[in-house]
Amino acid sequence: MSANSCLKIMSELNPHFDLIVSQLLAQMSLEEKIGQMSQLAGHEGWIPEHLIHALQAGKVGSVLNEVDLRTVNELQRIAVEESRLGIPLLIGRDVIHGFKTIFPIPLGQAASWSEEVVEQGARVSALESSTCGVNWTFAPMIDISRDPRWGRIAESLGEDPYLCSTLGVAMVKGFQGKNLKDTGSIAACAKHFAGYGASESGRDYNTANIPENELRNVYLPPFKAAADAGVATFMASFSDLNGVPASGNEWLMKEVLREEWNYPGFVVSDWDSIRQLTVHGFTANDKEAAFEAANAGIDMEMVSSTYHDHLQALVAEGKIDIEQIDFMVGRILTLKYDLGLFDNPYTDPSSLPKVLADENIAAAKQAALKSCVLLKNSNNVLPISTNAVNSLAVIGPLANDGYEQLGTWIFDGEAQHSQTCLQAIKDFVGDDVEVKYAKALKNTRSDDQDAFEHAIAMAKSSDVALMFLGEESILSGEAHCRSTIDLPGSQEQLIEAIAETGTPIVLVVMAGRPLTLTNIVDKVDSILYAWHPGTMGGPAIADLIFGVKSPSGKLPVTFPRTVGQIPLYYAQKHTGKPATNDSFVHMNDIPERAAQTSLGMAATHLDTHFSPLFSFGYGLSYSKFEYSNITLSKNNIAIGDTLTISVQLTNTGDYDSDEIAQLYIRDLVGSVTRPVKELKGFQRIHLTAGETKTIHFELSSDDLAFYDRKMQLNAEPGQFHLWLGGSSEASLRTEFNLIDAK
Ligand code: GLC
């Protein structure tokens, strides 16, 4: 096909491509086009011969996992100056929650319910990783995660489509900035498309069977929001989604992403996920895998080489059209233009702010402060006043471990930059309070209780025991799933031993997932859930413990009582026999030889109450908040209308603090069953002690829309309940109707 006819096709059929992309495409050989569709792994500071030759031949579109700046600039130089067409490279890196300055894990950032925190964290990550030539990151991870056994819940933004969509968009904005061409902006990547979070039994890479209606109403919305926000790329999931692995799923990648959403960016496979189509048994060999992935529209292959090895033949055999290839390559070239790489592919770090700059460190501390969730504070043991105590016992394997507090997916963060809790506590109290320290366990998995005696003695002679327990970072993240989610090792036994001393216990948990704390929740006075809080976890947690700030985080994910309750999430369906307190009879209370139908017939377990231990949206403060006087702008809204909801929020406590006001609805009747509650709005509000503010939310009829029985997105007239409060257990309720004004 002549260059002109290619240009004609490109500019007519795909106005998305600027003329410049079309002109470049017209000059490219098929081999060079396929080269753009190949991403190769870096070699951490050196460039092997085979990579040099591939670059010179124009057979590489991107390199990932190279962050040595000299090497990155040399990779770019070879690609630009030693190949025929001089096309620069995309340099990819997982900068999931920080590069050198590490922020709380994404699940922790989600607990801040703050778009500002999440956007700032991504901005700092982009600026810092840019100093090493990175121009593309594989984040945000916006897989809805409702199974805490799954290790990757740590890098997710939680269980709720609305919260995940809102914060996922904030992360895209942080990475991509106002313009991709700006220094310090990097391309983001919405991953893993789609349904990865529903991996059966919480085992990573496992089958994901999700009915289309559930997929569209729960798992796809965050990806649609990211697409609408202009995320530069998508990543295909490893998942076998309903029998068709995502990396070869034409329905998902073409019908939904391209035809329904008209998404213009490009899709990269996950690591080796195209070749794995054969491992799935979806294809018989690499050539078939290349066909299915290219046919579905996976534009770039991460690390495996099925495109390099077989695409040319597939085009020659007429199985893949050259137009399809041109669309795929055009999307890749367009991003390179959008990033300004053709103008300047090289990185001059002097043009960028320093890594670990003071403002970055300050942002990481703010994020950790707002991410911690106060789950319990009986007897108001927290905050601790340094005037009221003489000695503190700091106990546990996570009190002084700058590596573990960083969390999973840390490729470039370094423990040496971490400020630990022990050090921060010592810095805070100075000479006013004696701080004693006992690690007590070698690590979080240890069962060696030999050091307990020392810890017990210390606790006995202290006013408060501050215990730092949870999970080492390796126990969450990719491929790190657990079939039970209690505190590992002998940590529960350690808590019991310290509890027997009678000294008040403040438990600080660092973990990459919700843990089942049922066995110990009554043995401690206070629980502060810090997730893995990142570089500044220590100072942030110290400020919370001593009351410089009040905790304000809220749970982005449900905490089950037992692992057997999973999946357990607030936005569940009502069922035809809903669980109620009246219908729950604990197994131990069942009379012998009880009649078959005597226990009530409802959606409950016999051995565990159906409620969670801690609910989605829950989190305490040192203050207390009261919601009152909820009012609606009208009681009936028509399709196309907007409802304004107002409520008075009062800080009735003694502490200035933030409260995250949450708005939930329930659509009482739908053409498909609807959740008993759905988050549709939230605001982080600061109130001084005693202050009252009237806050307003807006709800449009579009906000009430869902995919119906025919997979059409519609808001259906009918009655709605609406709640406002500080968690998904909000009780302040009103009602309104959506009417069909025709
Ligand atoms: C991994 C992950 C993906 C990551 C990619 C590159 O296997 O699934 O999230 O971005 O490979 O490291």
Image (tube, helix red, strand yellow):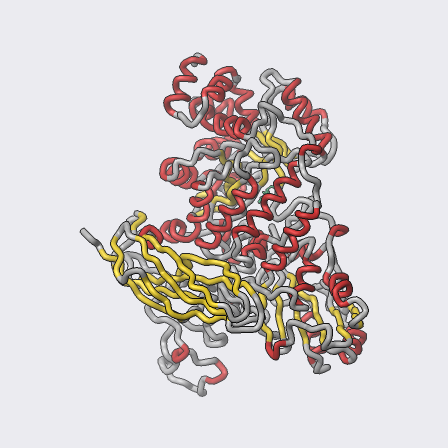
Please give left or right for residue 338 compared with residue 81 in the image: left
Q: Position of residue 574 (x, y in %)?
A: 36, 66
Which quadrant of the structure image shows residue 108? bottom right
Q: Position of residue 172 (x, y in %)?
A: 52, 43
Query: Which residue is located at x 67 percent, y 47 percent?
Result: 359
Question: Between residues 542 and 522, which one lies in front from this camera angle?
Answer: 542
Q: Position of residue 459 (x, y in %)?
A: 76, 77
Question: Between residues 274 and 302, which one lies in front from this camera angle?
Answer: 302
Regarding residue 222, the answer to whether it shows in the image is yes
User: Which quadrant of the figure shows ligand 1?
Assistant: top right
Question: Between residues 244 and 386, which one lies in front from this camera angle?
Answer: 386
Please give left or right for residue 47 compared with residue 210 in the image: right
Which quadrant of the structure image shows residue 275? top right
Query: Which residue is located at x 55 percent, y 21 percent?
Result: 32
Query: Which residue is located at x 50 percent, y 55 percent?
Result: 145
Q: In this picture, is 662 found above or below 267?
A: below
Q: In this picture, is 128 found above or below 644?
A: above
Regarding residue 612, the answer to whether it shows in the image is no
Question: Between residues 408 and 387, which one lies in front from this camera angle?
Answer: 387
